[in-house]
Image: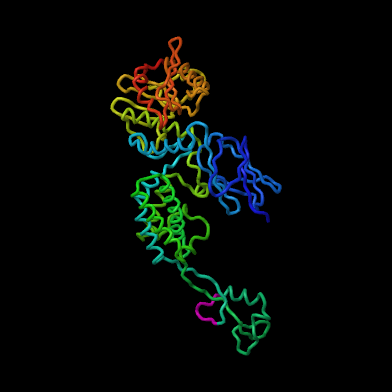
Amino acid sequence: MADLTARLVGKAVEERLTFDPITVPSQDLVLSVTGHQSRSIAVDGVLRRLSSGSTGLVSLDLKRSTGYHRVQIDQQVFWFATEDSKLKLAGVSAMLNELGALGTGWTGQVMFSDGSGYRDPHVVYGWLDQWADNVLNAIEGVLAAPRSETETTDVLSRRGGASVRTVPTLRYLRSDPQRNLVARTGGLVAIRGLECDPTRVVVKHRRLNVRTVPNRRAIQFLDQRGDAVDEAMIAGASDAAVARCRLWRLRINTLRARPLARALREGPRVLAAERQTVELNDRRYREVFHSVKDFRSRFGWSPSSDEQRRYSYVQSADLIYQAYAASCLAAELGLRQVGPVLGATPLAFTGKDFDIYYDALCPPTVLRSWRRSSSHPDASRPDVLLVERATGRLSVLDAKYRLGNDGFASEDSRKEVAAYMALFGLATVSILYPGDSAAGRAVTGHSKTIREVPVSPSSPALRAELPAILASMEQPTY
């Protein structure tokens, strides 16, 4: 078998993959694999199938991807990174770090309109801070003195007694009488007038089994905790946080190395299995079950997605930019986030004077288009809607992760927000885009204005443009 080789091929791209990630532009790519044994591979935790032939091919749509991607082929792992032409990987990392420090504008989780989500390492560390020590103590207690179940099996024995199983024994003897019976006067069994003794009988055998659902759940959860610790260390957190993560990782590795842990790791996944009796009346198992339940509910891991984890930290850069822009605006206005997950409810931020609706179909009492009362109502949902609560005045802002050739917002972005102006009867809308200039600009004509505001870690323009945005707020038309 030839050595396994994987290459990425695209426009002006032909790179061989290694364990150390290479970086390529965001675009449509083809993964080319030779020397493989299986045609099933995993890309970012999702199973894909290579085409037939000695060189297997699979297409990857990564035009909107900025982040790291993991490819697994025949138990070998390769990494590569994609970055766009705007903020690039360093810029996205800076956005995420800034989001983690915004406080009022970011809890560490984003839920997008398509139901997908982004888990920030800061949130993972927060979960570990709350649960890790207790659950590791519980798992250590399980490995030290695991609860077992009595398992009864049928085995062959040369000795009888009270444990003999009559029906299985007769079935066994009849299967091969010449081998399983010995003629003897006064024997226990009479067959065709002959008295015989069985050479073996079937007896009940009881043994203690530790491969139970609660024990396997604890070890499988221990493996996942190791992944979570690794994610938290990537966050670039404080030295104290990294030190704690290293101690957790050391303890997890020690527990995973125990012979019982290695034996319990095999077998089907049981993290989503129903709760067992021992997980009600034994404190150790109860602690493990509650932590499994909390982790799965908080981060949205299900029995299927356990095997389909996203390894790329940003699936769509424009979605994370939308969350970043909204959070930056909220931070400038001193607003607090309403719920634990950004985007889970229409009203995302609130404060003394202003509210922000995020990526939502707004209540008609706040904003509605002229089509809302037509025979074909629309479902328009601006990225960011800023509302002055006392007066009802508002401003529509659209976050566009695009750049024009001149470094400002793109023409496509201006066309899209112009549609909002017509739908809602507004004189002014704003585009938030990932530029690095220190000031925005306004496109004005016929009493209409499109304000272009750069919002990025390297630009202070949002704070400078905020008075103009507030001054342009207007009463809804319809």
Residue 331's image quarter? top left
Q: State which quarter of the image contains the N terminus.
A: bottom right
- The reply to whether residue 44 is visible in this rendering is no
Q: Is residue 288 left or right of residue 4?
A: left
Can you say whether 382 is above or below 201 in the image? above
Tell me the chief SS of the magenta region.
loop
Q: Residue at x 59, y 84 (%)?
A: 188
Residue that protrudes farthest toward the left in the picture: 352
Q: Residue at x 40, y 44 (%)?
A: 236
How many numbered dots are placed on residues in this image?
0
Q: Nearer the viewer, residue 381 or 417?
A: 417
Instruction: Tell me if residue 145 is in the magenta stretch.
Output: no
Q: Nearer the viewer, residue 177 or 110?
A: 110
Residue 442 at what x, y percent from top left? 43, 17
Can you say whether 232 is above or below 156 in the image? above
In the image, the segment drawn in magenta is 159-165
Residue 37 at what x, y percent from top left? 65, 53
Q: Is residue 194 left or right of residue 87?
A: right
- The reply to whether residue 140 is visible in this rendering is yes
Can you say whether 59 is above or below 164 in the image? above
Residue 179's image quarter? bottom right
